[in-house]
Image (tube, helix red, strand yellow):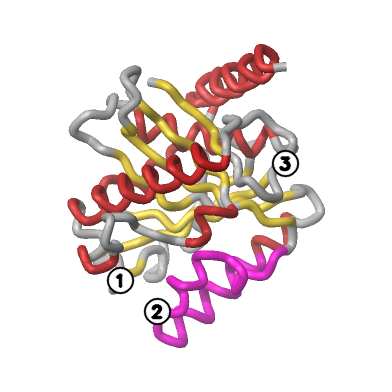
Amino acid sequence: MNLSLIAPHAGALPIIAATLTAEQYEQTIADIQRFRGRIYVQDEAIPASALDGSGRHYNKLDYSSYHIVARTHEGAITGVMRVPLYVSGAAVWFMQLYHVLERMEPGPKALYSSAIQQFIDQSATTYPFIVEPGGWAVDRQISEKLTGTTLVAATWAFCQLIGGAVAIATATVKHNSAALLKMMGGINCLEGTSNARFYDPFHRCELEIVYFRSDRVNPRFAAMVEEIKGQWQKREAMAA
């Protein structure tokens, strides 16, 4: 598996990421959006009408986010993760997940908004950044068994490389996405309550909101995170 980190062309931090020309960058974003759109429609996570005429699951957030892309040795995409980056203390309404909250009834919306903002505020003095892993898609027909796990570990590695971050992820219950995040060290602050998960009418499945901190990873996966960091840092040294 080849794992690359794609930086936005504007506002990128000085960390290792694939160096692309403007044309290559646009083609990579288009490839990511088509891949994500195809997988989401196959999984019935979105209707086919959510794709544009070229099959892209278009979102302007893609252009201001980092992306982690897994490919086969032949170059075919097998998995993607979008990682928007915010400064510490950002308001919850500024984040992509707020679109999910807006589809909730007033009571649950207020509960989740308050809980998320409290987590953000409590983390502000310790972690310089917030990331919002999303746009997570894996082609299970051609991917390696650990592609999903590797994408999450790579997100942890990214957070450590930028100097520390907390993450807030809206993860599906099906395909065990939320369970994987929690197994690797994430937490659902509403675990054990009737609000631990909720049904989202757009994605047509149950979701959980899972937090994690870059310096707290299940020891079982710490070596994987370090290996990914080492690979990216080695590429940076070779490119220098």
**Over which residues does the magenta segment extend?**
90-118
Q: Secondary structure at mark 1?
A: loop
Confirm whether the magenta stretch covers residue 163: no
In percent of width and height, residue 68 lies at 49, 37
User: Nearer the observer, disc 3 or disc 1?
Assistant: 3
Q: Quadrant of the C terminus?
A: top right
Residue 231 location, quadrant: top right
Alpha carbon of mark 3 to alpha carbon of mark 1: how far?
33 Å
- Residue 103 is marked as 2
In percent of width and height, residue 59 lies at 44, 61
Alpha carbon of mark 2 to alpha carbon of mark 1: how far?
8 Å
In percent of width and height, residue 93 lies at 60, 74
In percent of width and height, residue 69 lies at 44, 35
Residue at (28%, 74%) from the top-left corner? 201
| In the image: residue 220, left or right of residue 200 | right
Q: Quadrant of the N terminus?
A: top left
Task: From the image, tell me which residue sits under label 1.
Answer: 202
- Outermost residue, right side: 125
Residue at (31%, 33%) from the top-left corner? 78
- Pick whichever of labels 2 and 1 is earlier in the sequence: 2
